[in-house]
């Protein structure tokens, strides 16, 4: 397997193109999990993700003959941009196969870097199958996003930077899709400090690494269903699986709802935007069975479109109790809207929307349903509002 000297040599190569991404200490995330949390913001990396490291390292090591054949890769988006950028810098043609529903920002950025984009299938695995068809047909040189030792070597350069800046790091949390990133980070980090803990984080709906560990073999999930599109991989790489067995200390899974909460904190407290796959480590912090440790969260990418940002913020506000929607049955007589407004005002809740429908309740013709959405300050504030209505004999139903 790769050794420290391999990662150091890769670092010299990737330093030709990468942007420095110094660690950021996070007070809000530290307080939430009672550890000292640092963010490694690869979301600020050139091309918006860590993938440029592995792609550039791989292509930089190719022969002129291999580059002349043209390069091809399958990607959920970030590897695409890394390959396209490296190919442009090193004078090679690049073709990228991506899932049909890849966020538009990733597709456009890949094309702007000069690559030809082929959209195919629902998830990464479908795009990879198309990629292999084109390899056989046209003889392209494949740049695999994770099942390649040169790519793994490039990704491992992140660990060298983390431990140079924070030598006494106790834990590194790493997103897991195909497994190339965690393979490189784990092998490089443990070649420097064998006692450091490397923990992978997967979305619950696409936990292919955890499935492989449980079965002790590479397995394919029936589906990969998650908002973390960059890690929606049904089958972990064979080579990464060997690295994970050797170097990784555990895998944590997180729900899409936990991702939404972490996204909101990242945006609100740090003014940083990251894609759903990138914030997997931040969403996993509360699940760490550790306290008072120095934990580095590798935020792997920031390529997220504006519509997704808006949706994630709104859903994150709901999940953290910052937006509260409810319905209440009211007597069908004048003055009831005023009553509801007074209760909410007494609780310092700001009304965003109201829907008063006299025709929604078919069980009691003497009542109407009122639906209200208001701004709140968390679950304690919501409980205060519920109690205020209950004291007057009204039962409200949460509809978030």
Image: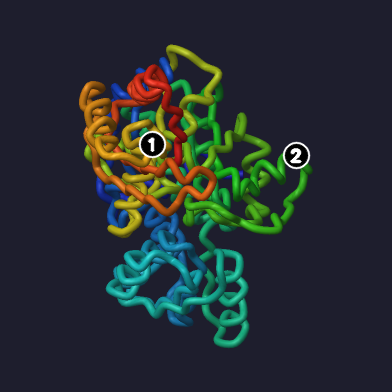
Q: Position of residue 322 (x, y in %)?
A: 32, 33
Q: Looking at the image, which is closer to me, 3 or 206?
A: 206
Q: What is the secondary structure assignment of the residue under circle 2?
A: helix
Residue 110: x %, y % from top left: 34, 70
Regarding residue 220, the answer to whether it shows in the image is: yes
Residue at x 60% of width, y 48% of height? 205
Q: Which residue is mark 2?
A: 214
Determine the image quadrant of residue 3: top right
Q: Nearer the viewer, residue 322 or 158?
A: 322
Relative to 44, does residue 197 appear above or below in the rendering? Answer: above
Q: With 303 as the anchor, is 63 left or right in this view?
A: right
Residue located 32% across and 41% down the image: 373
Give the image quarter of residue 212.
top right
What SS does tag 1 mark?
strand
Q: Nearer the viewer, mark 2 or mark 1?
A: 1
Q: Is residue 167 visible?
A: no
What label does residue 110 carry, if any? none
- Estimate the x, y position of residue 345 in percent, counting from the top left: 21, 27
Q: Which callout, 2 or 1, points at the residue further toward the start of the chain?
A: 2
Q: Badge 1 is on which residue?
A: 330
Task: Looking at the picture, tell me which residue is in the foreground, 246 or 103.
Answer: 103
Question: In which quadrant will I find the C terminus?
Answer: top left
Q: CA distance from mark 2 to mark 1?
A: 53 Å
């Amino acid at each position: 397997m790769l050794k420290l000297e391999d990662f150091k040599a890769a670092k010299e190569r990737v330093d030709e193109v990468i942007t420095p991404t110094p660690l950021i200490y996070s007070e809000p995330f530290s307080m939430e999990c009672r550890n000292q949390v640092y963010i490694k913001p690869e979301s600020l990396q050139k091309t918006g993700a860590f993938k440029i490291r592995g792609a550039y390292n791989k292509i930089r090591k190719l022969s002129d003959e291999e580059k002349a054949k043209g390069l091809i890769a399958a990607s959920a988006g970030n590897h695409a941009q890394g390959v396209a950028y490296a190919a442009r810098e090193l004078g090679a043609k690049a073709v990228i196969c991506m899932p049909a529903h890849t966020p538009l920002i990733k597709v456009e950025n890949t094309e702007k870097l000069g690559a030809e984009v082929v959209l195919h299938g629902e998830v990464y695995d479908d795009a990879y199958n198309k990629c292999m068809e084109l390899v056989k047909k046209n003889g392209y040189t494949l740049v695999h996003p994770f099942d390649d030792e040169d790519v793994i070597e490039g990704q491992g350069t992140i660990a060298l930077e983390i431990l140079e800046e924070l030598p006494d790091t106790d834990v590194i949390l790493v997103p897991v899709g195909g497994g190339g990133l965690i393979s490189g980070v784990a092998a490089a980090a443990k070649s420097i400090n064998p006692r450091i803990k490397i923990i992978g984080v997967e979305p619950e709906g696409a936990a292919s690494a955890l499935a492989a560990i449980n079965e002790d073999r590479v397995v394919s999930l029936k589906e990969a269903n998650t908002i973390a599109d960059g890690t929606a991989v049904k089958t972990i790489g064979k080579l990464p699986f060997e690295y994970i067995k050797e170097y990784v200390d555990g895998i944590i899974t997180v729900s899409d709802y936990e991702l939404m909460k972490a996204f909101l904190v990242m945006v609100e407290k740090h003014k940083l935007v990251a894609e759903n796959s990138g914030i997997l480590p931040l969403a996993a912090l509360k699940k760490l069975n550790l306290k008072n440790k120095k934990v580095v969260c590798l935020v792997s990418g920031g390529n997220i479109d504006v519509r997704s940002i808006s949706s994630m913020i709104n859903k994150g506000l709901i999940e953290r109790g910052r937006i509260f929607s409810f319905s209440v049955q009211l007597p069908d007589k004048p003055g009831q809207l005023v009553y509801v407004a007074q209760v909410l005002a007494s609780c310092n809740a700001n009304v965003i929307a109201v829907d008063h429908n006299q025709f929604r309740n078919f069980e009691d013709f003497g009542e109407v349903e009122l639906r209200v959405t208001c701004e709140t300050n968390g679950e304690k504030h919501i409980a205060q509002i519920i109690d205020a209505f209950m004291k007057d004999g009204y039962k409200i139903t949460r509809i978030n």
